[in-house]
Amino acid sequence: MTLTTVANQRLVLTGDRERFKELLRRRLLECGWRDQIRMLCRDVVKENEGSNISIDTLVTTVTPRARSLVPDTVKKELLQKIKSHLVSQKDL
């Protein structure tokens, strides 16, 4: 197993993965990312108004832009917290 796999399993088993996901959700909501994505989805739906756009198509279209809109500060904070947490785990 790779170190990434072991770290991910550790986070899942301890329940810390959910804690980090919740932190990410809060930060994205605080910085307005969620509202930006909502508007982006509306724009994509309007552009495809004549055709029925499926959820899968919407997700495929919006995902790359949504990922690029995540603020660097949020990414850095989350990465730092995960690193600190994993370093504090002595038996990893």
Image (cartoon, rainbow, N blue to C red):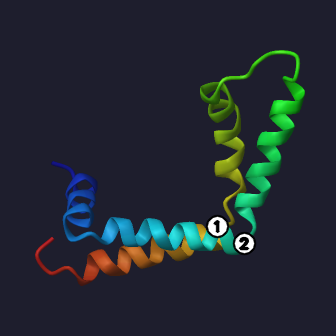
Q: Position of residue 74 (x, y in %)?
A: 61, 71
Q: Position of residue 81 (x, y in %)?
A: 43, 78
Q: Which residue is mark 2?
A: 31
Q: Is residue 64 left or right of residue 6?
A: right
Give residue 84's quadrant in the image.
bottom left
Q: Residues within 10 Å of mark 1 (few under 14, many from 20)?
A: some
For the C terminus, the image quarter is bottom left
| Residue found at the very far top of the displayed protein | 51
Q: Residue at x 63, y 35 (%)?
A: 59
Query: Helix or strand or loop: what does disc 1 sit on?
Result: helix
The three-letter code of the residue at mark 2 reads Cys
64 or 2, which lies in front? 64
| Residue found at the very far bottom of the displayed protein | 88
Q: Position of residue 15 (x, y in %)?
A: 27, 69
Label 2–label 1 contact, CB within 8 A: yes
Q: Which mark is residue 77?
A: none
Q: Position of residue 69 (x, y in %)?
A: 72, 55
Query: Helix or strand or loop: what does disc 2 sit on?
Result: loop
The three-letter code of the residue at mark 1 reads Leu
Give residue 9's quadrant in the image.
bottom left
Q: Residue at x 25, y 84 (%)?
A: 88
Q: Residue at x 28, y 75 (%)?
A: 86
Q: How many circles with numbers are drawn on the protein?
A: 2
Q: Residues within 10 Å of mark 2 (few under 14, many from 20)?
A: some
86 or 11, which lies in front? 11
Q: Which residue is mark 1?
A: 28
The Cα atoms of the two marked residues, 2 and 1, are separated by 5 Å
Q: Residue at x 37, y 74 (%)?
A: 83
Up/down of 43 relative to 33, above or below:
above
